[in-house]
Image: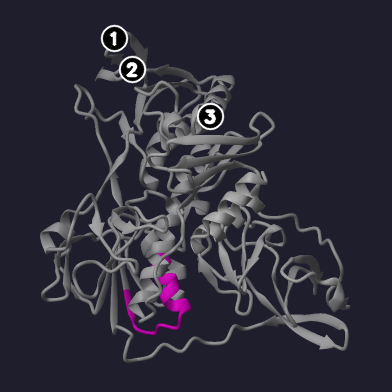
Amino acid sequence: MGGQSSELTGPDLAQGIALDSLKPGEPLLGHAGGEAVVVVRQGDEVFATGATCSHYGGPLAEGLVVDGTIRCPWHHACFDLKTGQALWAAALLPVPCYEVERQGALVKIGKKRQPPPKDVPHAQAPKRVVILGAGAAGAACAEMLRAEGYTGAITMIGAEQPGPVDRPNLSKDYLAGSAPEEWTVLGGAERYREIGVELLADDPVIELNVRELSVHLKSGRWLSYDALLFAPGAEPRRLSIPGADLPHVLTLRSLADSKAIIERAKPGARVVVVGASFIGLEVAASLRQREITVDVVAPDQAPLGAILGPELAALVKGLHEQKGVRFHLGHKPAAIDQSSVTLENGSKLDADFVVLGVGVRPRSDLAEKAGLEVDNGVVVDQTMRTSVPNVYAAGDVARYPDVGGAVARIEHWVVAERQGQAAARAMLGRKEPYKKPPFFWSAHYDLVISYLGNGAGWTRHEVRGDLAARDALVAYYKDDRVVAVATLGRDRARLELEDAMERGDQAKIAGIVAAQ
C-alpha cells in the first residue's frame, strides 16, 4: 500500500475553525502550512497531528480515537495525540504534532512542535541492552527504548544483512515486482546510527550465558548485558521427502530468500508452491503477477478453510483460480526432482523451482540450552519476561498469555513488533501487561483480508455483509464468545473490536458484531 494523495482537503486550520464544529472523539481532516493535519477534540482539549500513519501512510482521519490516542484504520498503529509517539505497531516512528492555539471560540493550528523528552528513572534503566535477533521484535524494541528516553547502550544482533526488513513486503509487493528493494529495509544502518544502536547484522549469537549475563557471537566476540531481548524468530520447516534439499527448493523468510525466488521467476517459468498457507498463497499471487505458471499443492480440502471458514476460503480460492493458479488440494508431494514434483497419488507437476510454505518452528534452541523455560517457544509472562531474570522474549519465539486467556505463540508480524515494544517498556520498569489482541493482514492481488484475534479452535462462525462485494465481517466463536474476526473493508468496526478485546468487554464485542 502506498501513501495518501498529496492533494490537501478540508478546512485551512491555520485560519482557524470553530471549537463547536469539532465533535468530541471524531478526527477532522484539514491542512495547515501546506500539510495535511488531523484535529481531535477530547473534552476541552484539542490536539493536532499529521494526517498519515508513519507505517504505510494510512488515513488517520478515518481512524479511531481511544483514551488520548488515535489508531490507524489500515494496520492498527496507535499514536499518542499529545506527543505523536508510536505507542503500538505497525508503526515504529512518530507522527508530527502541531501547536494548537485557542482564540475564544476559535481553534487555530500553528507550526510543528517537538515532543517533550521522556524521563527514564536511572535506578530502573539497564546500562546495556542486547537484542538477540534483528527482526520485527528487535527493531521495535530498539525504537521503543529510544522513544521512551533510554540513553544507555543498545546492541542488536542479527544473522544476515541488511538487518531488520519489512517482512510482509517479501511475499507481497516486493516479490510481485511492484515495490523497490529499499521499501523492504526496516530502519537501515543509517537509522540505527542516528538513534545510537549498534547493529551487528551478520554476526549471530552462538551461546547465551545467563549466569554471566553475556552472549557469545560467531565472530568470537563476547557481549555483556543488563537486559536482553531474545527474539531470533522462527525458521521455515522443510519436507522429509526425496529431493527436498535440492537447490531449487526454496523457502521464504529473509530478503535473500525473496531475491532467490525472484531470480528464478522469469516469465514462462513454472513453480510448484507446497502449502496453501497465507505465505504460500501470497507467494502464488505475487508470482502470478510475474507471469509464471503456478501450481499449489496442499493436503487441505480448501485453502485456509480451517482458519477462515468455507465461504471466505472459497472467495480466496476462486480469486486465485481466476488469476490462473492451479490447485491440487487433498494431496501431498512425495518426491521432488530437477524438473518436477511427484504427488502421493503418482501424478507429476512440471516445476522449474519449488517454494515451500509449510510452516515454521521457533528458534528456541539457544534459550533452552541457557536454561530458559521452553514449551513450543520461550515461555513469558504478560510483560514478556522469561523464567530468567533480565531476559525477555518476543515475536515468533515467544509463548505468552494472550488477551483472550489462552497461552499462545503467534507468528504474526505486528504481534512481534508490539511484543518488542512491550518488552522495551518492561525493561525500563513499566510493568503494564501486554493486552493487545493479535492482528495481521494478508494480500491476494487486490483482495486484502484483515484478521483480528486468536481464532484457534473456533467452533462456529457467522458471515455478515457481502463477501463478493468485499464488504464483510466474519466472526469466529468459541463457546458462544467471539474470539476473532476477519474483515474485508469495515476498518472502523475492526478498530472498535480491537479496543473492546483489549478491555475484555464481551458485551461490546457481541454488540459490534451484531451491528454489522
Q: Is residue 150 above or below residue 445?
A: below
Q: Are marks 1 and 3 in contact (CB under 8 Å)?
A: no
Earlier along the polypeptide chain: callout 1 or callout 3? Answer: 3
The residue pinned by badge 2 equals: 331
Can residue 244 be spotted in the picture? yes
The quadrant the C terminus occupies is top right
Earlier along the polypeptide chain: callout 1 or callout 2? Answer: 2
| Amino acid of disc 2 | His
Can residue 337 be spotted in the picture? no
Answer with left or right where residue 490 lies relative to residue 454. Answer: right
Please tell me which residue is depicted at 30% across the width and 20% down the height of the picture: 332
Answer with left or right where residue 232 lies relative to residue 464. Answer: left
Separation of disc 1 and disc 3 at Cα? Answer: 30 Å
Magenta region:
139-154
Residue 305 x/y as whole percent = 45, 29
Dot 3 alpha-carbon crowd within 10 angstroms: few under 14, some 14 to 19, many 20 or more = some
Look at the numbered disc 3 and give the secondary structure of its residue.
Answer: loop
Q: Disc 2 vs disc 3: which is toward the camera?
A: 2
| Amino acid of disc 3 | Arg
| Amino acid of disc 1 | Asn
Separation of disc 2 and disc 3 at Cα? Answer: 26 Å
Earlier along the polypeptide chain: callout 2 or callout 3? Answer: 3
Comparing 354 with 230, the one in front is 230
Q: Disc 1 vs disc 3: which is toward the camera?
A: 1
The residue pinned by badge 3 equals: 290
